[in-house]
Image (cartoon, grey):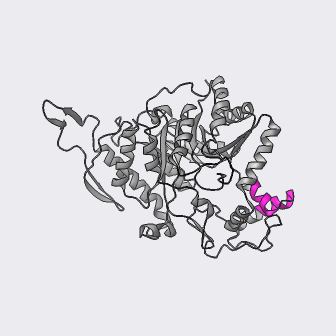
């Protein structure tokens, strides 16, 4: 039997995937935009809707990064509102473990799971970024090496809170005047290096027991964290070969944590462009990529590798003669490190530019595209299916370049083709996000169904 494809929709609020300057682009703040994309995803029987977070506007050369201003509202607040206008779609948001507290966040996510009848997901991310920490009066209080240590304890503490209400704790016996079975419902205690908390948790056991846990770390430490903790891993591996290598690696790590390969789903981010013919799709793709990489964006992205002020360079001209300056303070503040070795990246980019005779802007267009499915609906359905059946992924988190209508054409044309192939559902068959993802019930620390 062919593998069933998982599909999620990412609302593109930041980064240059989104083309906010396009005449067809709408607001990335108005609730109507979120509702349109979520309803479209649900009409297409997608598994979940995904929101990123941004805790501080990035700065580059001391100026606010333009794309950050487009839209970064609070993810959990938006998802809670979407719970009221959707019925089956999973609702997942990114929330940082560095600048939050387990008790507060566990309450909010459990509340979302209740209000959505079991559709909540939490993308666990970490940070040691002192620049972002200034917004929380903490600065860089956490060493880089400790970010996953705190994240792992954060998730353990949250699970302790969710476990504090046994599944049968609420009896609501009106005749007897007894709401809970015992007086200790919600009683908890977690004592560790980062968190020392105790008391009563206020939210009874939610429909999924635990929300679906998502993780995106790609370092060796991050992969182990995903294998130990996550239900879904969000990756950036964009080619079948790289996808297969990551898929094999992450699935092989599960055994040492007592888990089976089916307990973790691998979902790369992917963009798509559709056309009436292949030539039409390629022409549209070239137009979209030039919109995504404006002359200013090309220089901005090049500066992030060169770590120098390159504002005097012509984006339609050649690469700078000088090399990057890796020893200087980072030119960009508030963004996850994109390039571990700037000099190596620059050497690779120079080789590509020389071989293909590319200008700065043409090079940035060439090297910054993520996994993209381009072609007619039939071709895109075929590309997605082949990627998944080859175990390079379990599905995709699709990132449209337009808000709010960027998913409309995909749902109208590609989804029916995947259904005809028998690799995508024709109706929701489970009542929870966990069930639709094929994950099975969550289990408590004691190994019993949550």
Q: Position of residue 178 (x, y in %)?
A: 15, 36
Q: Position of residue 4 (x, y in %)?
A: 59, 30
Q: Is 49 displayed left or right of 403 in the figure?
A: left
Residue reaching furthest to the left: 176
**Above or below, comparing residue 380 to residue 362 in the picture:** above
**Above or below, comparing residue 297 to residue 446 in the picture:** below
Residue reaching furthest to the front: 23
Q: Relative to the observer, which residue lies in front, 125 or 286?
A: 286
> Residue drawn 65% across and 32% down?
389
Q: Relative to the observer, which residue lies in front, 118 or 36?
A: 36
Q: Is 88 displayed left or right of 371 in the figure?
A: left
**Above or below, comparing residue 89 to residue 52 in the picture:** above
Q: Position of residue 215 (x, y in %)?
A: 51, 49
Residue reaching furthest to the bottom: 328
> Residue drawn 74% across and 33% down?
379
**Quadrant position of the N terminus in the picture:** top right
Quadrant hosting residue 309: bottom right
Residue 373 lies in the magenta stretch: no
> Residue drawn 50% across and 27% down?
428
Span of residues in magenta: 348-366
Residue 77: tell me if it is visible: yes
Report the magenta stretch's main SS: helix
**Above or below, comparing residue 219 to residue 113 in the picture:** below
**Quadrant position of the C terminus in the picture:** top left
Q: Is 425 displayed left or right of 81 in the figure?
A: right
Q: Position of residue 325 (x, y in %)?
A: 69, 74
> Residue drawn 38% across and 39% down?
115
Residue 350 lies in the magenta stretch: yes
């Amino acid at each position: 039997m062919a593998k069933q494809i998982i599909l999620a929709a990412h609302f593109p609020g930041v980064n240059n995937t989104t083309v906010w300057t396009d005449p067809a682009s709408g607001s990335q703040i108005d609730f109507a935009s979120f509702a349109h994309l979520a309803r479209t995803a649900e009409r297409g029987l997608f598994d979940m809707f995904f929101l990123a977070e941004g805790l501080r506007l990035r700065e580059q050369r001391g100026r606010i990064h333009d794309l950050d201003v487009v839209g970064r509202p609070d993810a959990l607040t938006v998802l809670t509102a979407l719970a009221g206008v959707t019925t089956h779609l999973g609702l997942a948001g990114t929330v940082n473990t560095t600048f939050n507290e387990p008790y507060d966040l566990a309450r909010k996510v459990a509340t979302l799971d209740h209000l959505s009848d079991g559709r909540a997901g939490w993308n666990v991310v970490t940070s040691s970024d002192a620049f972002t920490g200034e917004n929380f009066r903490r600065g860089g209080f956490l060493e880089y090496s400790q970010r996953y240590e705190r994240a792992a304890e954060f998730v353990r503490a949250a699970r302790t809170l969710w476990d504090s209400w046994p599944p049968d704790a609420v009896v609501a016996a009106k005749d007897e005047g007894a709401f809970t079975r015992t007086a200790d419902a919600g009683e908890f205690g977690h004592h560790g290096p980062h968190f020392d908390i105790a008391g009563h948790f206020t939210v009874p056991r939610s429909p999924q027991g635990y929300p679906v846990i998502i993780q995106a770390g790609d370092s060796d430490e991050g992969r182990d964290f995903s294998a130990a903790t996550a239900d879904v891993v969000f990756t950036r591996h964009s080619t079948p070969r790289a996808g297969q290598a990551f898929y094999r690696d992450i699935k092989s790590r599960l055994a040492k944590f007592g888990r089976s390969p089916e307990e973790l789903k691998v979902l790369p981010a992917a963009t798509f462009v559709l056309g009436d013919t292949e030539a039409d799709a390629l022409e549209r793709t070239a137009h979209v990529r030039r919109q995504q990489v404006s002359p200013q964006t090309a220089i901005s992205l090049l500066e992030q590798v060169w770590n120098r002020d390159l504002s005097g360079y012509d984006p339609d001209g050649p690469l700078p003669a000088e090399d990057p300056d890796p020893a200087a303070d980072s030119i960009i503040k508030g963004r996850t490190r994109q390039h571990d070795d700037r000099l190596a990246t620059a050497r690779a980019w120079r080789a590509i530019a020389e071989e293909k005779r590319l200008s700065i802007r043409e090079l940035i267009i060439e090297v910054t595209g993520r996994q993209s499915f381009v072609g007619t609906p039939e071709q895109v359905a075929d590309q997605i299916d082949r990627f998944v059946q080859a175990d390079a992924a379990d599905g995709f988190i699709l990132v449209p370049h337009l808000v709010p209508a960027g998913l409309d054409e995909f749902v109208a044309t590609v989804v029916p083709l995947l259904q005809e192939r028998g690799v995508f559902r024709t109706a929701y068959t489970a009542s929870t996000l966990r069930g639709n993802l094929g994950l099975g019930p969550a289990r408590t620390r004691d190994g019993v169904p949550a």
